[in-house]
Amino acid sequence: MTEKELFAALKAFPGITSLNPMQQQAWGCRSAHICIISPTGSGKTLALGGALLRRLGAPGRGPRAVVLTPSRELTLQVADVLRRLGRGYKTAAFYGSHSMTDECGTLRGMPDIIVATPGRLLDHLQRGTLTPPERLDVLAVDEYDKALELGFQDEMRRIVRRLGRPRNLIVTSATEGAVPDFIDMSEAEYISGAEAPAPDIEIFHVESPARDKLDTLYDLLRAIPSGKTIVFVNHRDAAERVASGLRDRGIPAGLYHGGLEQQEREEAVIQLDNGSKPVLVSTDLGSRGLDIGGVEAVVHYHLPVSEQAWTHRNGRTARAGASGSVYVITSEADGIPEYVRTDHEYFPGEPRPAGPKPPVTLYIDAGRREKISRADILGFLVKQAGLEPSEIGRIDLRDHRSYVAVPRTALPAVAAVKGVKMKNKKVRITPLK
């Protein structure tokens, strides 16, 4: 892709009208090997996407690029950015718990770009369902520090050996550290986002009068400005209890932890991102690898177990130049670690005035593999349900399902179109719980 085509594609990213210095440097870099070291929230995925697409040949001749990512969530996010940025290229996402049958069918369609977790890509290579091209245009390893932390070094080494020597290498990391020895970056150009200003975060201490902090959390969430909020806890059972307790008190709260099915985690992130459940209760699994824009607040319901966890949790807010707030709830039972530092005391006062009710997320049982597009969903809701385009919120597509945020007042109109076909397919549309 040309630089002009890439900049034209930025219109697919609402709120992004220009690139930051790190992204500009990555997009304009002419070196065959690039190492991008930049903090969480600085826009590395967009930098990676532009650098990768600048190095691809014409689409339509099978896999030209492979991107390795350390998590399923990051696989989906990177693939989404590449699809929107490089519309002329077919991008596939492969990861554990995804249908192997669907992935094999996708490979027969000769995707140009494959974004995958190491284990799933190695599985395809060993099965022979993916035949390595004679020479890749690009091999990228996204968040290599996280991949090493999660123990993917052996899988990545075997993948690199099977894929051979690519024309271009791109690696990214949120922290400085040694690049794996099986990736030759000796002649790489290093691009740093370290010069970016420190996040604009205010950190508040909130004292809980009781060891059980649920009532204090409830009072806090009703008092602080409305917006996307992530509440961090240390254990799965605590996440379940806190999310359930908030819902019982009338606060729409999502749930995110490693014991949930992949689809459940995806839906929790979608509902946070589109505002239908503006509070997400999460373990530290959600502190890295999620690219959620506009998180206004982070709440430490439990104190983080390490300084690294403290940093990564707080990094969910004040991203891409925005400001954010962090709230640390403690009781007499807590010993506050040295790395937990607060700026102000905060005493939850009267609840803020009630605003409009959050939207609801609709689940549609058809997606990309049924040839459904965002435009199809938008057109269907406008024509069949009588909604105004401005009423329709974020639309997310998956292989066999889609999600769209609409006002709760639109539910009767949506229910009335039951049985109507979308793109010659009868679809089922239901509100997501």
Image (tube, rainbow, N blue to C red):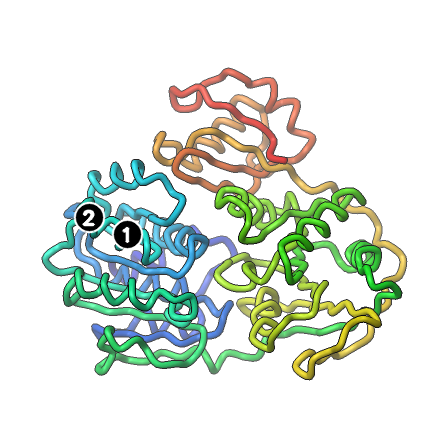
Residue type highlighted by circle 2: Leu
Query: Residue pushed farthest top?
Result: 419
Location of residue 200 by image quarter: bottom right
Q: Residue at x 15, y 64 (%)?
A: 164
Residue 71 lies, in percent from the top left, at: 42, 57
First along the sequence among labels 2 and 1: 1
Residue 342 lies, in percent from the top left, at: 73, 78
Q: Residue at x 17, y 61 (%)?
A: 162
Q: Is residue 1 above or below residue 29?
A: above
Tell me the element at label 1. Answer: strand
Nearest the viewer among 261 and 367 is 261
Tell me the element at label 2. Answer: loop
User: Neighbour class for label 2 at 10 Å: few (<14), some, many (≥20)?
Assistant: some
Residue type highlighted by circle 1: Ile
- Residue highlighted by disc 1: 114
- Residue highlighted by disc 2: 130
Q: CA distance from mark 2 to mark 1?
A: 10 Å
Location of residue 283 by image quarter: bottom right
